[in-house]
Image (spheres, helix red, strand yellow):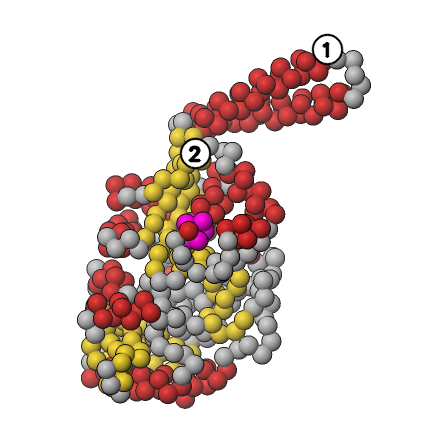
Amino acid sequence: MELVTLTKEEFLNFSLTNKYTSFFQTPYWGEIKSKNGWNAHYLGLKDKEKKIAATLLLSKKIKFFKTMYYAPRGFLLDYEDEKIITEFTKKIKEYLKENDALFLKINPYLDYQQHDFDGNIIENTAKKDFMNLMKKLGYKHMGFYINQDNKKDLEPRWISVLDLKDKSLDDLLKNMRSSTKWRINNSRKNCLKIIEATEDNLIEFKKLMKHTSERREFIDRPLSYYQNMFKILNEHNLVKVLLVEINFKELKDNSLETLEKNKEKLKTLSTSNNKKKEGQIKEIKLEQERLEEKIKVLEETINTNGEKKIIAGGWYMLYGHEIIYLFGASYKDFMKYNSQYLLQYEMIKYAKENGYDAFNFYGIDGNFNKDSKDYGLFDFKRGFNACVHELVGEFDLIISKNYYYLYNIAFTCYKKIKNLFN
C-alpha cells in the first residue's frame, strides 16, 4: 500500500463516495481554511490502483513550536477494517515526521455508542475495540465531554440527526411531536416569509448571530468569516442561508379584519334569545380581548421596528448524503412567532425533495437532564423526531512528545491569561 498526494478533484470524488464524509472533508473546506492561515494537504492510501482511504489534513505552524495538523471529521476510510486503519496511520505518521509535525488532531465522523430517542445509552453498543485499537496505534483520546460548557473539541461530539431515508414527507410530519406540528402550523399564520440570503444581505445573518451569541454566551465570528465561507461554498451550491422576515403590518391588518368579523358575529348572536349562544358570546368576547391586546402590541412593535423585520436565520451545508444545520440564530423578543420551526420544516422538506438521506441538526448537549442549561436546544430538535448521536470524540497523534508537552503547558497558560481579560 502507498500513501500518495491527491489532486483536489481526486479527493473530492473519493469524498463523495465515502460513508463517513462531511463537508469538512472537501477541497472547499480546505480553501476556506486557507483564508485563515491554514495549508491544505490531500492524501490518499492506494492498494495497487484502488484508493481505499483518504483525508484532508490542515496544517498551521505554531510560533516557537513545530506544525500542528488537523483532519477535520477525518479520516475517510472503513472504520470496521483494522488493517486499513493501521496501515493508514502508519503511512500518515511517516508523512507527518517528514513534514515537521508536532501532532495530528482528528475527530472522526463516527458514532461511539447508540442512544435511544430520549438520549439514554443502549447497552453494549460502545465501540470499545475501536478505542483500544486507536490507543494501540498511539492516539491519545482527549476525553468524553458531556456539557457544552466543558467542550474542548473543535467540533461537537454530540449531534442530533433526523433520518430521512425511506420515509415520505407525510411520514416525517406524522412522527414529529404534536407541539412541534402545532408550532409549524402556527408559524404559517404569522405572516412570515423565507428569504434566501445573498452576499449583499449576509449582514442580516451576522446581526442575528451577534444577538444569539450574546444571549447564549458563545463567541461569534466576524462578518468577514461568514462572507468568505459563503462566497466559496455558494459557487458550488453547497450552502443555503435562509432568513425569516415577519410583516408586522400584514399581521396587524389580519388581526383587525378578524376583530371586525368577530364584532359582526357578536352583533348577530346578541340579537338572539337562544341561551345556547351565551357560551359562544363569552368565547368571542375573550377572543376580542386577545385580538385587541395583540393589535396594541403590534402597533408598538411597528413604531419600534418598522413594518417588516428579519427575525431569524439558518445556515445549512449541503454535501454528500446529508444537510447540516450548522448555525441558527433568532431574536429573543420574536421567538413567539415560531420562525425557527418554519425554517427547519422547510429545509427538511427541501432535503427530502432533493434526495438527501439525513437532516443533521448538529450540535447538542450530552446532558439530557431537564434542568440542564442546554436541554431546551436538545428538546427543540428532538421534537422533529431527531435522534441523539454520540461521536467518538477527538484524538491526538503525538509526533514530537517533548514539544507536545511544552505546547500544552504554553497553551494552558495562554487560555488562563486570555480569560482574565475577557
- Closer to us: 372 or 198: 198
Q: Which residue is mark 2?
A: 246
Identify the residue at horizontal 49%, vertical 33% (top origin). 190
Left or right of residue 383, residue 107 in this image: left
Above or below for 57 versus 314: below
Q: Which residues are magenta?
A: 347-352
Q: Amino acid at mark 1?
A: Thr
Q: Nearer the viewer, residue 274 or 129?
A: 274
Instruction: Give percent across and percent down for residue 75.
Output: 34, 75
Could you tell me residue 283's position as x and y percent?
69, 25
> Observer-nearest residue: 273 or 367?
273
Q: Which mark is residue 271?
A: 1
Query: Badge 2: few (under 14), some or many (20 or more) residues near its Cα, within 10 Å?
Result: many
N-terminal of the pair, mark 2 or mark 1, is: 2
Q: Quadrant of the N terminus?
A: bottom left
Report whether residue 400 is seen.
no
Q: Given the image, on which type of amino acid does mark 2 rest?
A: Ile
